[in-house]
Image (cartoon, rainbow, N blue to C red):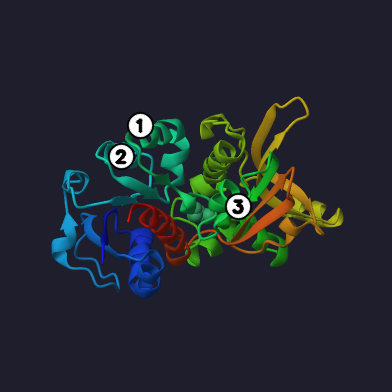
Amino acid sequence: MKEIKIGLLGLGNIGTGTYKSLEMNKDIIEKSVGAKVDIVKILEKDIDRERDITVSKDQFVSDPEDIFQDPEIDIVIELLGGVEPAATFMERAMDCGKHVVTANKAAVAANYPKLTEAAKRNNVMFKFEASVGGGIPVLTALDGAARANRYTEVLGIVNGTTNYILHMMSEEDMDYETALKDAQAKGFAEADPTADVEGIDAANKLSILMALMFDKYVHPKDIPTTGITEITKEKIAEAKANDCVIKLIAHATVQEDGEITYEVRPTFIRTYHPLANVLKEFNAVYVKGNLVGKLMFYGPGAGPLPTGSAVMGDVMEIARRII
Ligand code: HSE
């Protein structure tokens, strides 16, 4: 049986979740692909951490070139997080002929043209399903089964941390600071929650959605972005009085003249709209296409195993095409 060999960059929470996803479902994955699938090398400094996975110390490497230049490795999974060195490593991996899979929205959004060009120039696949909506297979659907559409609009709840905070403010009558502390205690928000609460993470995801749906690349820094830090109990009450809930919405629309407008901001959503019922840390992406009409993709937008599910889905798609 052919073996697909993978080099993994990063064994943090998401890297460990991906490794575990393969470990848990190896039989299903390998049967579906028709090949053995193994993570053979891992770039990671912290080799002693307790991770609840079976990993041997000789899988670890400290030099990424040990992965990029290994002729046996077919696919590189990048799960380092952050823009650099992740983006440079992905480009280098593709220049070395490797297919690349990532969950890293910041690196993809900031470097979309460069990374997609690297994939073309090297005739390799570059896949990033897990970068938007975590475990929700939204990019694969938009770029596959629904690709025949001319998309006219996307509205996304694409940040679980802020959706959780807004939910607790609205449903549990918490103020912003208390809801943020609760999100941190439950592990949804990072110790430094800036990228989430300022809307930067949602802008990264909107940049990727727009590139894919409208073939229009906008650097996330150029997306007008307002986070949720100024949302008060009074604003929540005002929304309720108007039969609305406040959601942090990543929004892009194609205007009649073809111009595309885009922004990320807290938005009043009518309580009957499906997005109003996306509660707690869940994510949803609502799109309009000229053939299919309105579609909504809903599910867990973060977490090691949901993200591992999406990463492994990309790996399997590549594996099927190269065996
Ligand atoms: N910090 C992100 C969120 C993680 O809260 O949704 C998933 O991208």
Q: Quadrant of residue 36?
A: bottom left
Kind of element beneath mark 3: loop
Callout 1 environment at 10 Å: few (<14), some (14 to 19), or many (20+)? few
Dot 2, how many residues are within 10 Å of its Cα: few (below 14), some (14-19), or many (20+)?
A: many
Mark with earlier residue (2, 3): 2
**What is the distance, in whole Å, between disc 1 and disc 2 at their CAs?**
9 Å
Residue 38, image x and y in percent? 27, 63
Residue 232 visible in image: no
Rendered position, 5 above or below 171: above
Tag 1 and tag 2, C-beta contact below 8 Å: yes
Q: Which mark is residue 92?
A: none
Where is mark 2, residue-wise? 94
In this view, the residue farthest toward the right is 242
Q: Position of residue 162 (x, y in %)?
A: 59, 54
Disc 1 from disc 3: Cα separation: 26 Å
Residue 201 is left or right of residue 3, and the answer is right
Q: Are marks 2 and 3 in contact (CB under 8 Å)?
A: no
Along the horizontal axis of the image, is 214 left or right of 97? Answer: right
Q: Earlier in the sequence, mark 1 or mark 3?
A: 1
Front residue of 293/279: it is 293
Type of amino acid under label 3: Ala
For badge 2, the amino acid type reads Met
Provide the secondary structure element on which disc 1 rests.
Answer: helix
Q: Name the disc covering residue 145, or none.
A: 3
Q: Alpha-carbon neighbours of circle 3 within 10 Å: few (<14), some, or many (≥20)?
A: few
Residue linked to disc 1 = 121
